[in-house]
Amino acid sequence: MVDRITLSHGSGGRMMHELIDELFMKELGNALLREKRDSAILKFGSKRVAFTTDSYVVDPIFFPGGDIGSLAVYGTVNDLSVCGARPLYISVAVVIEEGFETSRLKRITASVGKAAKTAGVKIVTGDTKVVEKGSCDKIFINTSGIGEVYYDGLSEKSVRPGDAVIVSGPIGDHAISILSKREGLDFGTDVRSDSAPLGGLIAKALGASRRVRFMRDPTRGGLATTLNELVEGRSFGVGIDESELPVRPGVRQACEMLGLDALYLACEGRVVFIVSEEDRRKVLSAIRSDPLGRGARIIGRATEEHKGRVILNTVAGGKRILDMLSGEQLPRIC
Amino acid sequence: MCLGIPMRVVKIEGSEGVVESGGLSRKANFSLIKSVALGDYVLLHAGFAIERIKPGEAKKTLKLLRDL
Amino acid sequence: MEVCGTHTMAIFRYGLRELLPANIRLISGPGCPVCVTPNRYLDKAIALAGTEGVTVATFGDMMRVPGSRSSLERERSKGASIRAVYSTDDALAMARSHPEREIVFLGVGFETTAPTVASSIIEALREGISNYSVLCGHKTMPEVMGALLAAGGVDVDGFLLPGHVSAIIGTSPYRFLANRYNKRSVVAGFEPLDIMQSILMLIRQRRPVVQVQYKRVIEEGGNRIAQVMMAKVFRKSDDLWRGIGKVRDSGYKIRREYASFDADLRFRPKPCREKEAGGCICGSVLRGVKIPSDCRLFGKSCTPDHPVGSCMVSGEGTCAAYYRYGGRR
């Protein structure tokens, strides 16, 4: 481990994983923590409860398609939903910088309330802290959530070669909408963040099949990092077809201009599903029946070959390895 | 760093302006190229238009590539 | 051989190597301006970032490049004033809105980027902006290609010429490749089909010439306005290329008339003692005589997350391309 924490340690990529494994797991690790799911699944008698937490430090705090408030709610409920749980209650803790305008705090709070209503969750507890000017940037929010698990059988271990990889919509929208407002980059675009609660979409997908193996929302590090997290150390690989990847033209253009790769850009309203081969079309239809899933596509499959690796079949007909994100692509994206 | 992407000129204000492509727009500096007109396609690099793109040649190349 | 980092990346990104027959081999040359920037330049930039009142503005890809002892990213994490920008226009805007600070722009890049920096200096002079200067590290392509061929040791039949550098300088600077060294060359675009068509054109050349595949952008004479602007602000000079050494007439220095915009003269930054990382063979990789997997640090102590050499950290470095797209095995 290096002697100082850098921005790369927070980017969601390889360095963050190293930090977690070499520092946090060493000090804090237990069987549940080591499972490294989006939510921990806890047993209370016959019930299973999903429990998750997330902190939001996004900059700018208001962006096309949302703000730090709505992001803080949707991000956490989605972490519950992708574990097959119905989100029920969340907590909201804020750290506010001295001097922050009350009107902006009001606006963010209204947004939190509206998002909680849309997502169908109750805010039941919270915390407020104010720190001196310069000790935090405007406002940081932490949300934790609990939900009731309603779907059995989600397990990375049950993924088999031939299983289909489905993504619920175009990738990279959130990251590009954030970047377009960053100082120094400053480009105009009609791309809006995809931040949204996915509980309804997921329920439809899970209702269509008993053989959904795995779900995750590709946030920091993007789709490529999420798929790598799935295959690392496993007995299968994943093959993705570049021509099937849904990417909006505005996102494509921004990537060309800034030298970015959409596969590594954060989404805040998308789910990656791994589903059995036989059920893939049923699940795809179910996802597409939801307004948030109209752009869903089957983008690839789990493979016998390339165990532990993600391979991209390029539009030019070649192949390349898709690694996890290295270093810091974009700080404070969520 | 050789990143140069083709974009269409949508606004001109002296030696500066705005270029657009696929819904994305950005301000551009035209001081490195000769006369530029609205609707022209230019190559944008590091915020500067460094060359005009010739649509006739672009069409020829596309045809050749299709025939390959 | 391709001598443009964007070509290297495109070849890997689209998996073009596997599509070629076995008797065609693609070698990567010194196409990444960040990779060929010597330690001393980075060390000076770091010294500037540590100077009271100075803000260093730089293209993003310089942030993580290791100098002798540190990197700009590491210095920023310790509190130094360093900002990544997309364009010199952004650096000038910073100078206008922060008259109390000295803005130093790190001028790294080949002939595609150098005109934008020249333009910024001319603009700063015109507007009377007095808190803007450039640490000039620009290098030029044709001379280093000549130096590689003259040194021998690299067995190359033809060159894929950099599309956007050539948009600026035209094709005549490359004629010596055919006339003096009997090598074929084609100015290539960046789409996968552009590259494939260019390779086909190279093979079909009956005698070595300089051809243009990237016709939709390239004028034979290049961009005269940009050439004039560069000649106005810069003069050619011998320059040091990381891993290659001194190459005659291959770099730009700011002319005396614009001395107040030359950060070297203005601040006389004192870099720390220069040190090259042991075991790093970036030099041989840049010359095309070794490939990244030949390096004993590759994939082990040198990865994109902990880069030892510049070829690994730059977005267009050969080692980064091999690692990201070719796997470590």
Image (spheres, grey):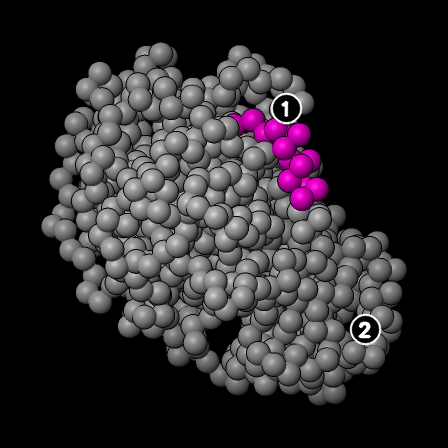
Residue C306 counted in the magenta span: no
For disc 1, the marked residue is B40
Q: Secondary structure at mark 1?
A: loop
**Residue A139 on image: x %, y %:** 52, 45
Quote the CA–CA distance across marks 1 and 2: 45 Å
Image height of A29 relative to A102, above or below: below
State whether residue C222 is above or below residue C157: above
Residue nearer the viewer, B37 or B17: B37
Query: Quadrant location of residue C124?
Result: top left
User: Percent position (x, y) of residue B63?
Assistant: 70, 42
Total numbered circles: 2
Chain letter of mark 2 equals: A
Asked whether C243 or A39 is in front, the reply is C243
Q: Residue at x 61, y 78 (%)?
A: A237
Quadrant of res C112: top left
Residue at the front extreme? C206
The kind of residue on which mark 1 rests is Asp
> Residue B14: percent from the left, percent from the top?
53, 12
**The disc labelled 2 sits on which kind of residue?**
Arg
Highlighted range, magenta: B51-64
Q: Is residue A273 left or right of residue A31?
A: right
The residue to which callout 2 is attached is A280
Q: Residue at x 74, y 87 (%)?
A: A46
Q: As displayed, is residue C64 above or below residue A65?
A: below
Which numbered disc, 1 or 2, marks the residue closer to the eye?
1
**Residue at left 39%, top 40%?**
C59
Quadrant placement of the N terminus of chain A: bottom left
Choose between A86 and A34: the one closer to the eye: A34
In the rendered view, does C118 fall on the left or right side of A41? left
- For label 2, the SS is helix
Residue at 54% across / 39% down in the picture? Answer: C214
Pick whichever, C154 or A65, lies toward us: C154
